[in-house]
Amino acid sequence: FPALITIRSIFARWIKMSDEATGGDGPPVPFHDEETFKAWMSAGNKNSKKSNAVDDFAEPDEVELEMMRVVRSKLSKENQDVDDQTLNRFIRGYGKLHFSGSDSNMERTAIITNLALNWRREVDFKNLPDKTLPKRELFSETWPTCVCGVSEDKRAVWFATAPGDIKKFTLEEVGAFHTQDMATLTRVKHECAARDNRAFTGLHHFVILDAGWEDSPGIDRGILKYLKQSLIHRCTGANTTQHYQPDALAKAFVVNTPFIYRALFSFAKLFLEATTAAKFNLYGSDFVSALAESGISAEALPMYLGGVAPNPPGLRQKVKVASGKKEVLKCSIETWQTADTFVCGTTFTRGECDVTITLNDKSVPGKGSVDLPLTPGEKTIVTLTFDNTQGAHRVDIDLIATVARRTIVGDAAPAPAPAE
């Protein structure tokens, strides 16, 4: 009898996992782990037509619209109402590109789309940005990330430092935090499109990665491997960022990159497909003009990198004020921000000086550590003045200058399960 109970429980668990992976009445899934998923993806990518890549600002043509109709018809009932914007990402990323050389193009696109939509429902992707996850604040200090701005062509700009020691968190926690970040980015991208009256276009985003952030170990292969492992979905073997959020990247800029990495990448680009290689750009410390040429202005660059956008939550900017000098920093909270609070914190690590804060030219009481209320949808300029004109020695400060939403709804979201 106990053996029968055990067998029954195992069978019930297998049925549950199978239903999660296929969506019940959705297309059957011919893989079950990372190895079989990679083989399936590789088989579908043979003879793919890289020239089919669609410009991000091109409206869907009749071929795309018909592909959307066909793929939608193959989805499970609970995924039939997927919005056109999201479905079109999968058509452009898979139907017209990755699987374009496969005889089973539409079937493969439907399978990966259905799985991704199941996963989004599993983690409550739509509402995840509003959730409060345990240890989120500590993770943000370990790996500061944020949507730091909007480019000149109205596309979201995602910023991240090189990850710190994320291994002190479990795989489940890392996966949940990164998924929350991607959900926030997706929401901002759709908000940008809506403000600009775009239904399908301009949904690619820019990425800025600071490889030289002094509180991280740099680009550490062990940490990157741990991050990748945290994103593998247990039922399918798919990477929930790479495979479940396709057709997303406009360009990536890695700044403050050591010379050796830039030299190696210049060689590696010779072996990459041209459109892929063009998306990735490595720079040393002279990167501001290159970003500006791509439409990323100072308003979309964090303060600590020389811009005027708020720093990511958890990042401590190192401010040094020479003897007899003033240091003036400005932060611009743009109209697209949904934050309702500007968070400022100053910790003197060497000496002390006077600190003055103004909000839209109005002086704010406090000695450098305040939470200032914001009105979402209104541009706000915060000016921080560190006055050491009377000081005989240099003053060093750890500065927190970021934005936050104090109005949080809902409970902690479930973490996406890692690979077993």
Image (tube, rainbow, N blue to C red):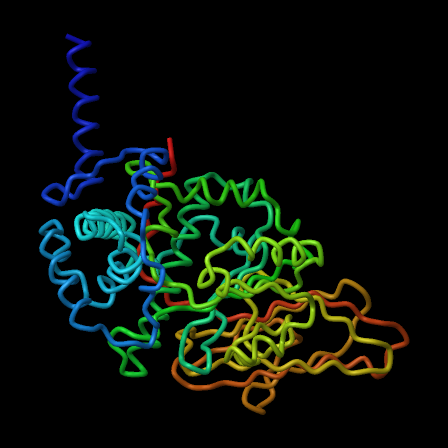
Q: How many marks?
A: 0
User: For this view, does 35 lie left or right of residue 300?
Assistant: left
Among the 4 quarters of the image, the one containing residue 132: bottom left
Q: At 36% across and 33% down in the image, what residue appears?
A: 35
User: For this view, does 81 lie left or right of residue 200?
Assistant: left
Q: Position of residue 254 (x, y in %)?
A: 58, 62
Image quarter where the N terminus lies is: top left
Q: At 40% across and 80% down in the image, what residue appears?
A: 154
Q: Nearer the viewer, residue 360 or 253?
A: 253
Among the 4 quarters of the image, the one containing residue 9: top left
User: For this view, does 39 lie left or right of residue 211?
Assistant: left
Q: At 72% across and 70% down in the image, what residue appears?
A: 319
Q: Position of residue 155 (x, y in %)?
A: 41, 75
Q: Is residue 377 above or below residue 95?
A: below
Q: At 56% across and 65% down in the image, what residue appears?
A: 281
Residue, far bottom: 361
Residue, far front: 47
Q: Nearer the viewer, residue 97 or 151?
A: 97
Q: Position of residue 158 (x, y in %)?
A: 47, 66
Image quarter where the C terminus lies is: top left
